[in-house]
Image: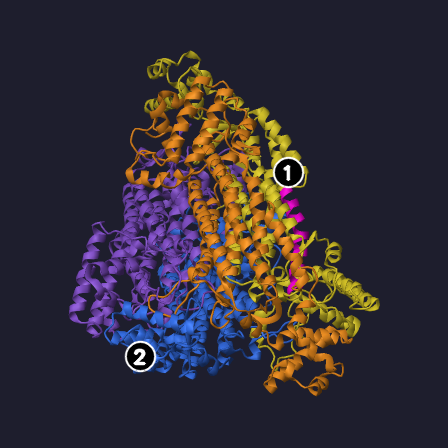
Chain colours: A purple, B blue, C orange, D yellow
Amino acid sequence: MTLWGGRFTEKLDPAAWALNSSISFDQRLALQDVDGSSAWAKALEQANVITHEESQAICDGLRAVRDEFEGKTFLYQPSDEDIHTAVERRLGELIGPSAGKLHTGRSRNDQVATDFRLWLLQALPRVDAALRGLQQSLIGRAETDTDLLLPGYTHLQRAQPVLLSHWWLSYFWPLQRDRQRLAQLQERTSVLPLGSSALAGTPFPIDRLALAEVLGFMEISSNSLDAVSDRDFVAEFLFSSALVGTHLSKLAEAVVLFSSAEFGFFELSDAFATGSSLMPQKKNPDVFELARGKAGVLLGYLTGLMATLKGLPSTYDKDLQEDKEPVFNAYDTLKAVLPVLADALRTLAVRPERMRAAIDPGLMATDLADYLVEKGVPFRQAHTLAGRAVQLASQQGQPLDHLSLEDYQSLSPAFSSDVYTVFDPKQSISRRETAGGTGPKAVAVQIQQAKKAVASPA
Amino acid sequence: MTLWGGRFTEKLDPAAWALNSSISFDQRLALQDVDGSSAWAKALEQANVITHEESQAICDGLRAVRDEFEGKTFLYQPSDEDIHTAVERRLGELIGPSAGKLHTGRSRNDQVATDFRLWLLQALPRVDAALRGLQQSLIGRAETDTDLLLPGYTHLQRAQPVLLSHWWLSYFWPLQRDRQRLAQLQERTSVLPLGSSALAGTPFPIDRLALAEVLGFMEISSNSLDAVSDRDFVAEFLFSSALVGTHLSKLAEAVVLFSSAEFGFFELSDAFATGSSLMPQKKNPDVFELARGKAGVLLGYLTGLMATLKGLPSTYDKDLQEDKEPVFNAYDTLKAVLPVLADALRTLAVRPERMRAAIDPGLMATDLADYLVEKGVPFRQAHTLAGRAVQLASQQGQPLDHLSLEDYQSLSPAFSSDVYTVFDPKQSISRRETAGGTGPKAVAVQIQQAKKAVASPA
Amino acid sequence: MTLWGGRFTEKLDPAAWALNSSISFDQRLALQDVDGSSAWAKALEQANVITHEESQAICDGLRAVRDEFEGKTFLYQPSDEDIHTAVERRLGELIGPSAGKLHTGRSRNDQVATDFRLWLLQALPRVDAALRGLQQSLIGRAETDTDLLLPGYTHLQRAQPVLLSHWWLSYFWPLQRDRQRLAQLQERTSVLPLGSSALAGTPFPIDRLALAEVLGFMEISSNSLDAVSDRDFVAEFLFSSALVGTHLSKLAEAVVLFSSAEFGFFELSDAFATGSSLMPQKKNPDVFELARGKAGVLLGYLTGLMATLKGLPSTYDKDLQEDKEPVFNAYDTLKAVLPVLADALRTLAVRPERMRAAIDPGLMATDLADYLVEKGVPFRQAHTLAGRAVQLASQQGQPLDHLSLEDYQSLSPAFSSDVYTVFDPKQSISRRETAGGTGPKAVAVQIQQAKKAVASPA
Amino acid sequence: MTLWGGRFTEKLDPAAWALNSSISFDQRLALQDVDGSSAWAKALEQANVITHEESQAICDGLRAVRDEFEGKTFLYQPSDEDIHTAVERRLGELIGPSAGKLHTGRSRNDQVATDFRLWLLQALPRVDAALRGLQQSLIGRAETDTDLLLPGYTHLQRAQPVLLSHWWLSYFWPLQRDRQRLAQLQERTSVLPLGSSALAGTPFPIDRLALAEVLGFMEISSNSLDAVSDRDFVAEFLFSSALVGTHLSKLAEAVVLFSSAEFGFFELSDAFATGSSLMPQKKNPDVFELARGKAGVLLGYLTGLMATLKGLPSTYDKDLQEDKEPVFNAYDTLKAVLPVLADALRTLAVRPERMRAAIDPGLMATDLADYLVEKGVPFRQAHTLAGRAVQLASQQGQPLDHLSLEDYQSLSPAFSSDVYTVFDPKQSISRRETAGGTGPKAVAVQIQQAKKAVASPA
């Protein structure tokens, strides 16, 4: 049984059937399809298209179908072209010909758009929860790893000392923006296409606002032609996922770096590291590498979908069938990666002495320039003088804080003996108490902001 | 002059300079750079880092620099590595050494992030206006082309009759979603990074909230490490642009189709069509083809930027310099394409008779099935019967409304002589008055919704 | 059992295991893994690392494992992290501790690279065969549909008449280029990484050239660090697939257009078209729409993989595990789509009268200009005059060949009564016998070229 | 003047003109356009379409136009829609009406495809030269940095010692594959479209093979419809560029890592590093970061073009105008980046002692396992035992070579006092003399192979 054979004199070629069929992946919409169909049956009843008894029978039958899906006892047939066909076929087996009234006034075009939006409306909060899980892990680290200093890097060169708490939180805020984007997407997804029928609107007097309310949608679509082809919510989810992926790739790159022997700032727990089939000493940060690699994969899903959408006119074209797999894959990827990263961070060991040792006096060169600024030297000149000091120290083969006072004074008379105080990294950090800075008080405020952010809807 | 030569003993290699320099494209941030610098000078004064006189001198000098940019009299020097260097260099020429105090406590890292956000905050409303321009053109068509019928298509096969007004508006709503996305991006862009310095926060007691207010930002960034590397707003703009591009490609594909001789529904104005260097008769819809093609280009900008971001750890890496050109290009593309499409739509001629002639009786096959539904036949069976009627008509080589009543009744006794009324396309349309449907009243409501939407901020 | 637990004190976290494990997709490399291992065992024997008896036992055991894979009786264990682990685990069960000698001197890094290349070496000829299948279908059409005329289009506007045979073959040559690219990729894939060990080369005196010969590789890799990380062959396969996808999308777009009611040039066989769940009259070209849509999906695989590769240093990083799924998916996509398109083309009906009717006299406007050229008018002027004729005919509301001779002569005295001969489309076509042109003789030559091309290796 | 105004009654809208015009970028094809036109004029003469005098006049005129382009004295006019129009317009100014005979029998469709291929045929050898420049730089390093050891890494964890020469060459071979791909593209680009006219083939008896020979093409296109729309060579160039970009990103990532304070293996020359506007001590590897970032940008060009191509039917659509900018940009990017990287590598300083110090005894754990293998222990067991030794050393807080013999023997009686010899990294390296391995002799062979490869055409 297909839902469309009437005018055809020949059956679909088996290889064409295999290509065309979507049941292998759209069965994931089974519950949403049943729920959407139940609501539709009731709406048909309210519109006096079917009787109360018919509606009742359909809804009872659909409940039985739903139980089969939930109990994993539903048996798919080879003829089930897609989930809609499977549900209607099974409904017919259970309740007989009145099942044939269910599809009145609707089409698979508005049906699948509705199912898919319903699915995403349920999936988004789960992604949000997974993002919050990682955020909490980062806050936990920020609260635990207080008072630890490490070099901040730009261009992967040591730049200035920062607090490790501050560093952890630099990965928190991107996820907060992700949550905000997904929350806005939740609203944009919550627009009901059902009632648009194939493209022109349903001819039966369906109360679409009531239908939306039953199904938990906030709004109804305004234009039937647009409603059946609008896949903005898909593109937006894939973009948001890819941007989450990019954020995770940043964190992953940093953890991979800091777990190297050369940095040596972090050591992963054995429970979140793997070994080599050849080299017995290896302890590899595979889960972070995978997180980084999957940023590419997620970007591929986005690109693929948008290229598929490009150049289609409005209303439904079959190309749109390619919308589901990337969404399911992106969702599964995020759900697999986020909790693992959260736990891997929670359990990693930090090595304060390695981090502290990496703060060589050169990282206070900006403080040295600022010292001159406070003595009245314009910053641009102060910067040059501090640069010369760096050069001089390098020529002498010694650290910046080992230059003699004479050397300093040879560069500028503004230097005096208090110059050596600038080389204390704690002082450097404590000077940065502006909002968002790495000073301990600013970071304490930031931790409170982060806790508040993670506790609320984005 | 560079802003960083102090510690170096050798000048940058000329080819490396050419690769590294960004002045060729970041000069587009000139006004934003000046404005950000003025605000910074005042903030330094308020923080007692520089005197009132110094601040005054700097701001006066910057005003003169700004005038040069606006008057296009600013002379770039080969040594101007980037716009920040150019501005500071020129300021020094105008006001002398106190120019060297401007860069105190900030870095090009927070400066460029601020400039770029400022630029986008000013650009987004212009994109919104261009989108509204096209929306208004679509509303105008919907109001003008009332009462005209054409086939609606799915799979590029004639499906059901729809009103041309409804069809035009199906391209309106995607743009409305675009405007909403851009409005949300506007808020997310309105977060001030200035005061984050290179990565660790500025060591001077800058009032960042006051600074944000002066520059028109709604919020300040929460974490300095994140603030200097956050390019989410860039990715999001490129995504939104690419999605606009996809929407325009849909419209373009449809107009190209409808302007073909075979469809013949539209004829472009000579002012928006071009010819062939070889074939004298050709009249080509180039501007729509370009709009469609540029959807690909815009997707490329998005992909490129996200691939560039992938795998960078947090804080500033030079790779981020690749963020500007795609944004400028995407903006220019939208600004070039949108008004042309708006005017091309405004001036195109529609051919009602061609559209009407394309509505063959087969398009009312769904109405035929619905007719049976109203006679009590379950829809699934009604669908099959209508399909058989289509098949029969096809075998007889005549349109669906030319089947004899006997033929109809041979398929089902539910058919009676009133069956022929279903073949009036106007009736088919007038049956679709559910919200969002193609019925004339529903479309009238939709036009009002569209006018309200375009008149308000998204 | 993992292949690497020795130095670890804690087991891998279950969620991390699930993320890290690749058995769900790399089991597709089972036979290649066994074959590579057998060859390695023999190479170890030849290098006197293991005895003849050990090698024999290993090879016998591997043969049994291979039989299990082929007979689908192989039982995976939850501890099988990847296909390499599964094979070695099973081998141990079958032959005991001497299985532990197999992995001597190699690593999963060179092993998986070898397996994957072996797989692709076997897959590429199958893709080539599928491409040839579609090419043959196109040649078949070109031979069948001889003497049929249709309009050629540029910008989707009717341009000049062409032979349908010529049109079909315009989709043949892109596939020929695809075949050539894949054949060159075959050679580039045929480079053996085995013997590179984890990264530094194997410490045992393996004869890699002999090993290559046994496994059917043409060359051995030159640098072990490169060999374990080189995924160029993956990127190149995904690019070639995406370009095939683009070519299919062109064909698909054209068939979708030509199958529309408005063009009406083609009618798909019922065996390769589908219907609507709502609209009984619909006959949709789904398989072509899917082919077009999958061009986007294939592009996504390419983009994703390349973004994953970007920014990794050389040698093996775990991110590379993301290389397999896109390749398997791309391969499956091509194998599913190509034969269906081939059969759908073979079985579609063409409508000569619809195509012929679409050749209005305007399509001979270039011939009209060429007529003037032959009378000595420079082409640029002839083009303008023919354009004026088009304009004049349009103003008179009649076709170009209905303009009176006076009208023509009012435009230019070069026109005389023989002008009307240019409006015969057959003549227009027969004038284009230059190589590659649409003239019947040129097309006959082209058919022979195509037959020769498809019969030979690309 | 446009080349197509005849049939139009209204001029193109100025904004539409701006969108449609391509002169801003296709002027880069000026010389190719002139050369193609000269060849065409001669071909028209040979086909007796124009006289020898006309051909002579046209060619003389074109030579003058060419001189203007080369001398940068050519004056573009606002009406120059594209380079073809500009050339024909100027030719007309120089030689009068006979210029109007040049465009006989051709179209801008085959003309631009010819120009663009000609351009690429000239550009590809320059890209090859730039690739060879970087290859030579790598060979130079490999020859200079002989006998230096550093850790090889997998998963960014120290794995096994390798020779620095070997490491440098691991970046050589990917470029060799790039060169091979580009050489094959050169052949595929060398197919002449000229003579295909707009789409149907030229009606004049042009000898296309002779024309190809004059212009330096190896073949002529086989199908005119395909020839005017085939942009495979564009896609393939952009793919090859993006893959070059990926290879450069690998090298760049590695150099950035090794130039960090933590690795400290490399120090960039001051001539190839830049500083910070804020932090006086910074020395940043900007050129390598840009190379890495541009890998993303190059991928964007590829994606954009392929998305643009997707869904177009065959023959020319205006969307194809988007093909040029990405190619020019990709070419400029490669030409800017490759020489800078070559020189930056040539001039960087390596720090042998830092590299040597990073080879801790743990890197010989595989050798330790191999030691047991040689004592008859199966590798799998040997791997486990070596892993236990690593664990034991870690628990004792000492390096692997400081475990006592008793400790070793407690793990396995196969250990005896000669075990400590395995910890010599030079010995570890010298054991890897299989082809492609890191042993000194194998690397010496590899250097010879590389020199031979770079000296020959790819």
Say if residue C360 shows up in the picture. yes
Callout 1 secondary element: helix
Question: Tag 1, which chain?
Answer: D
Q: Quadrant of the N terminus of chain A?
A: bottom left
**Residue beneath disc 2:** B431
Q: Nearer the viewer, residue D247 or A448?
A: D247
Kindly indicate the quadrant of the structure image that contains residue C380.
bottom right
A383 within the magenta span: no
Residue C11 at what x, y percent from top left?
A: 29, 32
Residue D256 coordinates in the image, percent (x, y): 50, 41
Q: Nearer the viewer, mark 2 or mark 1?
A: 2
Q: Which residues are the magenta region?
A: D109-132
Dominant SS of magenta comes to helix
Please report, as a chain letter, where disc 2 is located: B
Specify the quadrant that holds the C terminus of chain A: bottom left
Q: Nearer the viewer, residue A429 or D235?
A: D235
**Residue corresponding to mark 1:** D136
